[in-house]
Image (cartoon, grey):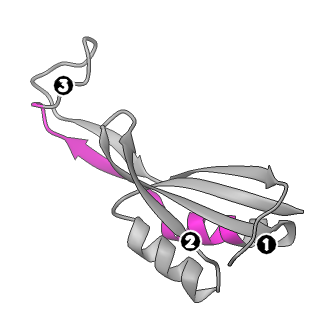
């Protein structure tokens, strides 16, 4: 069975994720995207694979898109429950990965 892996990753992590997927002979389609709490730049990648390759692709994405802490300055508008005079720490990076069944795909 064929699978479509959709991964939303931080734009800082995208070059190494894509480079390492391609080194391992996976074709990657990259889409610019944004959203989430920080409204920061993300990259959405699409990878079509056979079912037996799914775990390997997920492991590569995980290896090169680690989450990390980042300090957000007090000028950031986060909402009513955060003291606007104090910077705060948030987690960025990592990946959100979706795996979908695909009836058919072809490379032409």
Q: Residue at x 71, y 58 (%)?
A: 4
Residue 95 locus on image (x, y percent): 53, 53
Disc 3 from disc 2: Cα separation: 35 Å
Residue 102 locus on image (x, y percent): 80, 55
Marks 3 & 1, CB-CB < 8 Å contact: no
- The answer to which of marks 2 and 1 sits earlier in the sequence is 2
According to the image, label 3 marks what residue? 77
Q: Residue at x 9, y 31 (%)?
A: 75
Q: Is residue 53 left or right of residue 89?
A: right
Q: Secondary structure at mark 1?
A: helix
Q: Quadrant of the N terminus?
A: bottom right
Disc 2 from disc 1: Cα separation: 14 Å
Q: Which mark is residue 10?
A: none
Q: Nearer the viewer, mark 2 or mark 1?
A: 2
Residue 61 locus on image (x, y percent): 58, 66
Q: Which mark is residue 28?
A: 2
Q: Secondary structure at mark 3?
A: loop
Q: Residues within 10 Å of mark 1 (few under 14, many from 20)?
A: few
Q: Residues within 10 Å of mark 3 (few under 14, many from 20)?
A: few
Q: Residue at x 56, y 70 (%)?
A: 63
Q: Residue furthest right?
A: 1
Q: Nearer the viewer, mark 3 or mark 1?
A: 1
Vertical comparison of 100 with 26: above or below: above
Q: Which mark is residue 53?
A: 1
Residue 22 locus on image (x, y percent): 56, 82
Which range is magenta?
57-75
Q: Secondary structure at mark 2?
A: loop
């Amino acid at each position: 069975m064929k699978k479509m892996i959709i991964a939303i990753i931080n734009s800082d992590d995208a070059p190494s994720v894509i480079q390492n997927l391609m080194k391992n002979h996976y074709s990657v389609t990259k889409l610019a995207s944004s959203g989430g709490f920080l409204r920061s730049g993300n990259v959405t990648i699409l990878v079509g694979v056979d079912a037996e390759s799914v775990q390997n692709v997920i492991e590569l994405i995980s290896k090169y898109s680690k989450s990390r802490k980042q300090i957000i300055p007090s000028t950031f508008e986060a909402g009513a429950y955060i003291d606007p005079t104090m910077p705060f720490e948030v987690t960025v990076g990592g990946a959100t990965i979706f795996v979908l069944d695909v009836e058919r795909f072809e490379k032409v």
